Image (cartoon, helix red, strand yellow):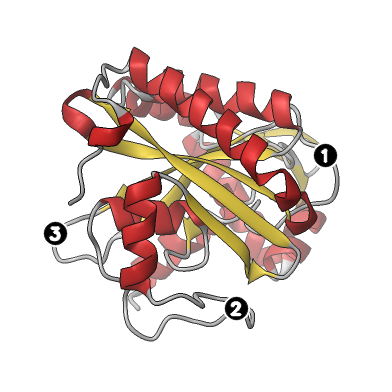
């Protein structure tokens, strides 16, 4: 790894430490979180603050800077489906009191597809933290969104994927992906972390385009409510998809 790339990756790690649950960090706490020396981290924070990506709000306390808001506004402006999907995510969180999220499939030339969690709910969450709350890149074989997006895009899983628990990917992928395409629903049960499960459905756009995944992460014990939760999830996604121009009936959902 080149020195430039290593510097950029360290800066990215610092910025990713800030989220809805950690909007502010002290130098000491952030250094402990990242496993870095405070002297090294202080240099990074000073540089990021000077660029406007962070701002200092007190004695050795930092928040995200206004320049990131400018950049995020430009990104959201290029993704017109984000606002309706984000509204559906927050409505679902308030109605279920569970962590809800939006995920997308990113594919670049010469790069393996990645499932990225681009938003998580803040309102409506109750109970203990669940696996994946702080993850940006989601495992395609052990997360509900990952399975959904890989299945609907007709992708094979990468080889030599990690086994997180004894329950990771118990069903052969060809069989499971076919079931996901028929049901328009993906589910995991204790596959990423024992005690945590997930559900995900697609956000659709004009021309039956799969725009992203709307999902719920929940304690496995609440899977006893799977029928009710699946219905609420489908209703939220259907409403957002209708706003985004999706008109095909569910029975006509295309199989890649």
Instruction: Determine which residue is flagged by label 1.
Output: 59
Residue hosting label 3: 109
Badge 3 marks a residue whose secondary structure is: loop
Compared across the picture, whether 230 is left or right of 79 comes to right
Name which of mark 1 and mark 2 comes first in the sequence. 1
Q: Find out whether the residues at labels 3 and 1 contact each other: C-beta distance under 8 Å.
A: no
100 over 152 or under it: above or below: above
Q: In terms of sequence position, does the residue under pointer 3 or pointer 2 come before the other?
A: 3
Residue drawn where x is 31% and y is 71% of the image = 174
Tell me what residue is drawn at x 56 percent, y 39 percent.
101
Mark 1 to mark 2 CA distance (whole Å): 40 Å
- Which of the marked residues, 3 or 1, is nearer the chain's N terminus? 1
Q: Position of residue 195 (x, y in %)?
A: 76, 64
Name the image quarter holding the N terminus.
Answer: bottom left
**Within 10 angstroms of label 1, few (less than 14), some, or many (20 or more) residues?**
few
Residue 198 at x, y percent in the picture: 60, 53
**Mark 3 Cα shell of 10 Å, populated few (<14), some (14-19), many (≥20):** few
On screen, residue 42 above or below 80: below
Q: Nearer the viewer, mark 3 or mark 2?
A: 2
Q: Secondary structure at mark 1?
A: loop
- Image mark for residue 164: 2
Residue farthest to the front? 251
Distance between the alpha carbons at the discs numbered 3 and 2:
29 Å
Q: 58 or 107: nearer the eye?
A: 107
Identify which residue, 108 or 153, lies in the foreground. 153
Q: Is residue 205 left or right of residue 88?
A: left
Residue 66 visible from this viewpoint: no
x, y (%) of residue 121?
64, 33
Q: Specify the label residue 70 is tagged with.
A: none
Q: Are marks 3 and 2 in contact (CB under 8 Å)?
A: no
The image quarter containing residue 77 is top left
Of all residues, the one furthest to the top in this rendering is 243
């Amino acid at each position: 790894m080149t020195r430039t790339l290593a510097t950029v990756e360290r800066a990215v790690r610092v910025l990713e430490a800030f989220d809805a649950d950690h909007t502010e960090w002290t130098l000491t706490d952030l250094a402990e979180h990242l496993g870095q020396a405070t002297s090294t981290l202080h240099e990074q924070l000073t540089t990021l603050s000077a660029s406007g990506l962070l701002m200092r709000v007190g004695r050795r306390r930092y928040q995200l800077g206004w320049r990131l808001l400018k950049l995020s506004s430009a990104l959201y402006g290029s993704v017109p489906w984000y606002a309706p999907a984000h509204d559906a995510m927050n409505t679902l969180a308030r109605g279920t009191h569970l962590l809800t999220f939006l995920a997308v499939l990113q594919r670049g030339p010469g790069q393996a597809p990645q499932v990225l969690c681009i938003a998580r709910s803040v309102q409506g969450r109750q109970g203990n933290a669940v696996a994946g709350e702080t993850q940006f890149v989601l495992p395609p074989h052990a997360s509900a969104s990952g399975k959904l997006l890989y299945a609907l895009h007709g992708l094979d899983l990468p080889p030599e994927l990690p086994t997180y628990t004894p329950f990771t990917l118990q069903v052969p992928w060809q069989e499971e992906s076919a079931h996901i395409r028929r049901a328009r629903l993906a589910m995991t049960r204790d596959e990423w972390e024992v005690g945590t499960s997930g559900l995900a459905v697609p956000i659709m756009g004009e021309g039956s385009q799969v725009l992203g995944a709307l999902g719920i992460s929940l304690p496995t014990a609440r899977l006893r409510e799977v029928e009710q939760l699946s219905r609420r999830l489908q209703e939220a996604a259907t409403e957002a998809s209708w706003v985004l121009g999706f008109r095909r009936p569910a029975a006509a959902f295309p199989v890649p």
